[in-house]
Amino acid sequence: MTIQNIFHLEGKVALVTGASSGLGRHFIKTLSSAGAEVILASRNTKKLQSLKDELKHKSHVINLNVNLNESVMQLMNEIERKKLKVDILVNNAGISDPKKFKELTEESWLNIIETNLNGAYRVAKVIADLMLKQGDGGSIINIASILGIRVGLNLTSYAAAKAALIQLTKSMALELARSNIRVNAIAPGYIRTDINKDFFKTKKGKEYIQSIPMNRLGLEKELDGPLLLLASNASSFITGSTIVVDGGHLVNPL
């Protein structure tokens, strides 16, 4: 390994959930550009196929609903059928449903927990089992949020799920370390995506931006460094960590 190729992923296979849009779409492009063979997984296979057509390296499209055990099992069946060896998992699938706590319904609460926590657990469990069977270690990267570390208004269920995901990351890291399976998290702050760009043009959105010490939104490409660090052998002695990418948001006392 040299400085020039320390983040290269040639010969590795990376699975990304929630890959059809937002950060997941960007993660697929980044991992593929670094040389990885990628597995695009989400419910929207039409968008996945369109993304697949843009990639230069080998890739696979698999339908996945992280909320359903049978869908996760079908994912594993497809991986086995294609004889793929998964080295990297980016557990990215997630949703948000902003509501004041006093207006939060049980249905909304359970929906967020089901996707953002239980879904991440389901995929991490089967992929960790696969990595153990493969016997060559691996890297699991859970996409958390700064709201798993500090709270924000109207995001009770989202913050609770992301906080639990960070603890899940640490627990998995502790138990899987001796099998050379590294488990880490990335906690993005406010990152501009096609999904949220219109909101951040509003008065409320601009107020959020003013709370960031760097006084701007993060860019998707500014997650590339942490992603490639954790996905590659450059992080071979890093596990149980959460890398915060937030423009100083967490250190702002306001």
Image: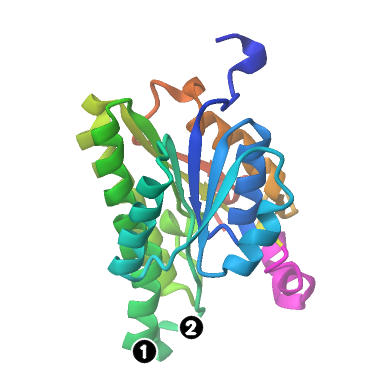
Image location (x, y in percent) of residue 196: 68, 68
Image location (x, y in percent) of residue 152: 50, 67
At label 1, the amino acid type is: Thr
Span of residues in magenta: 194-211
Q: Quadrant of residue 245?
A: top right
At label 2, the amino acid type is: Lys
Examine the rendered structure and indicate whether residue 204 appears above or below residue 238. below
Measure the C-alpha gap from mark 2 to mark 1: 9 Å
Question: Which residue in the rendered view is the most extreme toward the right?
Answer: 201
Q: Are marks 2 and 1 in contact (CB under 8 Å)?
A: yes
Residue shown at 22%/25% (left/top)?
178
Image location (x, y in percent) of residue 82: 43, 45
User: Left of 225 or right of it: where is 110?
Assistant: left
User: Left of 93 or right of it: where is 168?
Assistant: left
Mark on residue 99? 2
- Counting residues from the N terminus, which is met first, the one under dot 2 or under dot 1? 2
Q: Nearer the viewer, residue 31 or 118?
A: 31
Q: Which residue is mark 1?
A: 105
